[in-house]
Amino acid sequence: MKIGICSDHAGFDYKDRIISYLLGKGYDVVNFGTDSEDSCDYPDFAHALGTAVDNGEVDCGIALCGTGNGMAITLNKHKKVRAALVWGVSLASLAKEHNNANVLVMPARFISYRMALACIRTWISTEFAGGRHQRRVEKI
């Protein structure tokens, strides 16, 4: 699985640690930035990830910013992106199971790194339920 990842300055530390974690688990990871804690504009990185999802360059994505809201709003402007803002494992599971979310967005200033990893593990391992949920996803 090829996973794209991006962050702004608020999510930079988690992003770099998550990349190492994912590589250690054997995933192919594409880093769309940012590459420092210098103040930056989250849409620049969200659009890069969203475009890669739209074009099939990555299978799914992970995005982090301070609240997660800016990333989620920007990513969901992309036609093939279904970005879900999560801060706990139940939300991560339901984002995939019910909404077939293909981008996981997390608020780096409001969750621990440990919780971020738990959300990622849950989201990756959860299957889309299909059925009535497929009909709803198609309406998006």
Image (cartoon, rainbow, N blue to C red):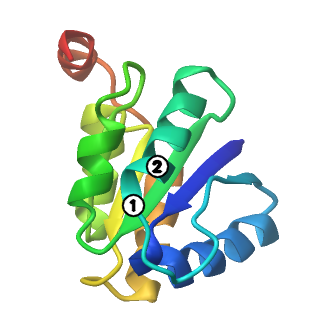
Q: Which image quadrant for residue 68?
A: bottom left
Asked whether residue 126 is in view, the answer is no
Three-letter amino acid code of the residue under disc 2: Asp
Q: Residue at x 26, y 70 (%)?
A: 87
Three-letter amino acid code of the residue under disc 1: Asp
Apparent side of residue 122 relative to residue 101 in the rendered image (left or right): right
| Position of residue 88 measured from the top left corner of the image (x, y, whole percent) | 27, 71
Whether label 1 touches label 2, CB < 8 Å: yes
Label 1: few (<14), some or many (≥20) within 10 Å? Answer: few
| Position of residue 78 measured from the top left corner of the image (x, y, whole percent) | 37, 26
140 and 109: which is toward the camera: 109
Vertical placement of residue 136 versus 32, above or below: above
| Position of residue 29 measured from the top left corner of the image (x, y, whole percent) | 73, 54
Apparent side of residue 50 relative to residue 95 in the rendered image (left or right): right
Quarter containing the N terminus:
top right
Label 2: few (<14), some or many (≥20) within 10 Å? Answer: some
11 and 125: which is toward the camera: 11
Quarter containing the C terminus:
top left
Q: Residue at x 60, y 32 (%)?
A: 52
Vertical placement of residue 42 versus 94, above or below: below
Vertical placement of residue 74 versus 13, above or below: above
